Image (cartoon, rainbow, N blue to C red):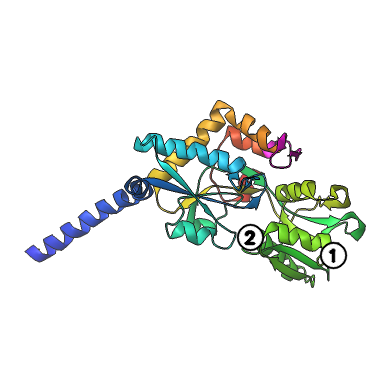
Amino acid sequence: MNHISKLALALIACALCATPALAQDGTLKKIKDNGFITVGHRDASIPFSYYDDKQQPIGFAMDLCAKIVDAVKAELKMPKLEVKYQLVTSANRIPLIANGTVDLECGSTTNNVARQKEVSFAITHFLTANRYVTKKSSGIKSIDDLKGKTIASTSGTTNIKQATDLNVAKNMGMNIIPANGHPEAFQMVETGRAVAFVMDDILLYTLVASSRTPDDYVISSDALSLPEPYGIMMRKDDPAFKKVADGAIAAVYKSGEINKIYAKWFTSPVPPKGINYNVPMSAQFKNLLASPTDSGDPAVYK
């Protein structure tokens, strides 16, 4: 073996050794160098991530993200680390994580295998299923009753994809309208532009409870999906940062503090309108608390 070959091998070996190190300190180093962490949030994913009456981001996911931020401060020994907030949408949340604009995305984002190819997720913090809301007067009793009807769902979500797949698989002939946000899609049902709005059931419960006439609506017992895990997004291939995030969530679960945080947002009046959504903790979620996981496979949560 000549000198050049030995040198080439040595360089390759160094590169292989360096790659994991670079991946491990990526986000933590970025945060330390910049002196701030950027938290992505939603404006209307009640009660996970939304604006209060002072235009401040609050919610269940925001509280959990605050625990992660505290853990990052401790890890970096930067107790006065600045926290910046960045509004994200269903359409841009993944690109903003991937390109480094946002460090944590705190909302109601489904963790699935397809998305795990682009981003990483912290330990699951909620379980939902894809259902639909209709007006009681519509006469819709089952998924089959949606054949040939106009329905709405939010653009860039797994929900609209599942509705589209169902439409094709069962040849239902539905007209599916993509909305720019959850409130817009719900308004389509309110005004009669769509007969149903397909979305995560927890978000439907909050939209109905917040509406002018909650008793006019019904959320389907039929589900278009298995239980779907929500996760806090972060950049892919960054094990050091993920370890901090997962550790923070696991600590909240193990200590039992999660029960207090859950009750604050799901079984108590929440700001700004003081509405109680009365969503008790599901058996599947209780199982998750006992055995935390970041799996994107819905079958794991059955």
Picture coordinates of residue 203, whole percent (x, y): 71, 50
The residue stretch that appears in magenta = 268-284
In which quadrant is the C terminus drawn?
top right
Tell me which amino acid carries mark 2: Thr
- Label 1: which residue? 192
The answer to if 277 sits in the magenta stretch is yes
Q: Nearer the viewer, mark 1 or mark 2?
A: 1
The quadrant in which residue 89 appears is bottom right
Q: Give the main secondary structure, helix, strand or loop, of the magenta stretch.
A: loop
Residue 282 visible, this angle: no
Residue 96 located left or right of residue 182 = left
Q: Residues within 10 Å of mark 1 (few under 14, many from 20)?
A: some
Residue 269: give x, y in percent of width and height. Answer: 73, 36
Residue pointed to by mark 2: 157
Residue at the (84%, 51%) spot, across then down:
218
The type of residue carrying mark 1 is Gly
Q: State the residue at coordinates (34%, 47%).
A: 24
- Say which element carries label 2: loop
Residue at (57% x, 35% y) in the render: 291
Looking at the image, residue 126 sits to the left or right of residue 192; the answer is left
Residue at x-position 81% and y-position 67%: 193
Left or right, 221 with reference to 295: right
Q: Categorize mark 2 by other alpha carbons within 10 Å: few (<14), some (14-19), many (20+).
A: some
Asked if one can make out residue 140 in the rendered structure from this viewpoint, the answer is yes
